[in-house]
Image (spheres, rainbow, N blue to C red):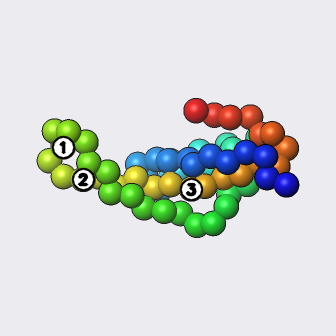
Amino acid sequence: MITDYEIVTATRVRELQDRVRERIKSGWQPLGGIALLHEEEAGDQKPHLVFAQAIVSSNGGSSHS
């Protein structure tokens, strides 16, 4: 049974891979595929991409904020 859910984000694919791998080592599992988000912040000249991966834990995996 799933006991926790998080979304890991990064601005580069390699960074997302590294972050997800670290969560896997802590007992988390990826859920579904990667999502791409276009985010805009005040003052930005153009939107930037954010890569996201949902992860779940069934054993109370430790949270990494």
Tell me: 65 left or right of 11: right
Q: Position of residue 36 (x, y in %)?
A: 42, 61
Callout 1, which amino acid? Asp
Callout 2, which amino acid? Pro
**Which numbered marker is on residue 44?**
1
Residue 62 image-quadrant placement: top right
Label 1–label 3 contact, CB within 8 A: no
Task: For label 3, count other residues whose C-alpha is less than 10 Å away and answer few (under 14), some (14-19) or many (20+).
Answer: many
Q: Position of residue 41 (x, y in %)?
A: 25, 42
Label 2–label 1 contact, CB within 8 A: yes
Please give the residue where the numbered disc 3 appears in the rendered image.
53
Rounded to the nearest whole Å, what is the CA distance between mark 1 and mark 3? 24 Å
Q: Nearer the viewer, residue 41 or 27?
A: 41
Task: For label 1, count other residues whose C-alpha is less than 10 Å away and answer few (under 14), some (14-19) or many (20+).
Answer: few
Which structural element holds mark 1?
loop
Q: Nearer the viewer, residue 52 or 4?
A: 4
The answer to whether residue 32 is above or below residue 56 is below
Q: Position of residue 7 (x, y in %)?
A: 57, 49
Quarter that holds the N terminus: bottom right
Rounded to the nearest whole Å, what is the CA distance between mark 3 and mark 2? 19 Å
Q: Nearer the viewer, residue 16 or 60?
A: 60
Q: Is residue 35 among the parts visible in the rendering?
A: yes
**Which numbered marker is on residue 47?**
2
Give me the residue at 56% from left, 47% from top. 8
Residue 23 image-quadrant placement: top right
Task: For label 2, count other residues whose C-alpha is less than 10 Å away and answer few (under 14), some (14-19) or many (20+).
Answer: few
Q: Position of residue 33 (x, y in %)?
A: 58, 67
Tell me: 22 left or right of 60: left
